[in-house]
Amino acid sequence: MSTHTGITEAVLTYQPPHPPVKEFEPPRDRAFFADPEKKSLLSAATKVKNLTPYIGTELVGVQLSQLTDAQKDELALLVAERGVVFFRGQDITLDGQHELTKHYGIQDRDPNQQDPRHVTILGNNNDIRAYSNFGGEYHSDHSQEANPPAYTMLRMVRTPESGGDTIFTSQTGLYDKLSPTFQKLFDGLHGVHSSEHSYINSLNSGYQPFRGPVRREHPLVRTHPVTRLKSLFYNPSFVIHISELKGQEGVHALNFLREHLHAADDLTVRWKWEPGSVAFWDNRVVAHRAIPGGYDPTTREGKRTAIFGEKPFFDPDSESLSQRIARVGGDPAKNEIVNLFFKSPHV
Ligand code: SIN
């Protein structure tokens, strides 16, 4: 969490060209249209590699440029279930990526995004431990918005030989690993998400943010509309307080949540990029961070596209991962995670 202000003349006089995005109801999540078994997509892969039990699947032998509409819907469901799905050696073009993104909903626009269709993601040579190191800290992309992004795709065009990896962590897993006492405490609370500090940082770094800063509350525990699983909706880049708590209670609760996230090696997948690699993640249930430093930042470039998600909501009747596993007949103690807990309730 950042505490600096960094107010300068440039910050005070800058007029962002676009107004804030108003809350709206996006089209129905494409994962609802998928065959729950995902037969069409999975049978097209030469290999389905679950990279860790809790998060991350690599589909080998699939070209995103060739997916049928049914396979695209099944991919949405797989992403919702596994948090992030990876591909290598993709031949999809930038136009193809825009078209594919449109299949999933209404294209989202990052506040710093100049091209309306994608964000260009570059390398970062900052010190990972530096103060206010945006991008290097875990985040969910612009979680402060009324409709934060859902499905998000990053395709790497150029990558360094080594360095610039991205880490993804399951917030469904993070919620699940809390004690029942902490789960009960956090259920129904609201995180205060703010982009004020990233806005100021952008201006002071010479960028021209497209929209002004936003401060907004979202449920600290959210329900995924398709899987109906509970996950934390926390990230240390944008969540600055918990509404229902007093000042120091909030500070310590956020410190705990940050440590919980940073210590979650069992809920994390680290992806090493190559040119033509793609990560497709569900920004609603995954926090991520690009690892900066140790490489020439001019050698890393990617194109990120995303769609607007629903307004985050909390359904007290939705389940934790362990409750789901137990309900569908698995034993959470045996870590029967893959292909078990994600039997979505609409099946
Ligand atoms: C992002 O934060 O969305 C970009 C991740 C990356 O650079 O790997």
Image (cartoon, rainbow, N blue to C red):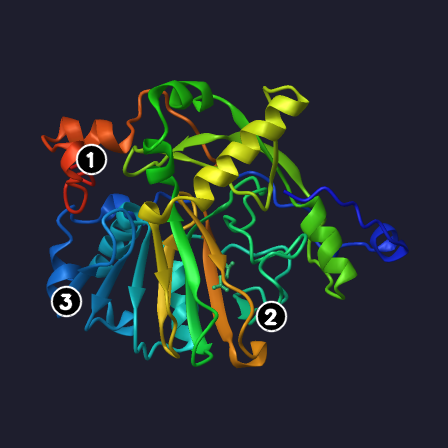
Q: Amino acid at mark 2?
A: Asn
Nearer the observer: mark 3 or 2; the answer is 2
Nearer the observer: mark 2 or 1; the answer is 2
Q: Amino acid at mark 3?
A: Lys
N-terminal label among 2 and 1: 2
Of residues 334 and 150, which is closer to you in this image? Answer: 334
**Label 3 sits on residue:** 47
Q: Is residue 252 left or right of residue 45?
A: right
Instruction: Identify the residue shown where x is 49% and y is 30%.
Output: 220
Instruction: Identify the residue shown where x is 16% and y is 28%.
Output: 326
Element assignment for label 2: loop
Disc on res. 250: none
Q: CA distance from mark 2 to mark 1?
A: 45 Å
x and y percentages locating residue 204 in the rendered image: 78, 60
Q: Is residue 310 above or below residue 210?
A: above
- Which quadrant of the structure image shows residue 60? bottom left
Of residues 146 and 241, which is closer to you in this image? Answer: 241
Disc on res. 125: 2
Element assignment for label 1: loop
Q: CA distance from mark 3 to mark 2?
A: 35 Å
**Label 1 sits on residue:** 346
Q: Is residue 146 left or right of residue 180?
A: right
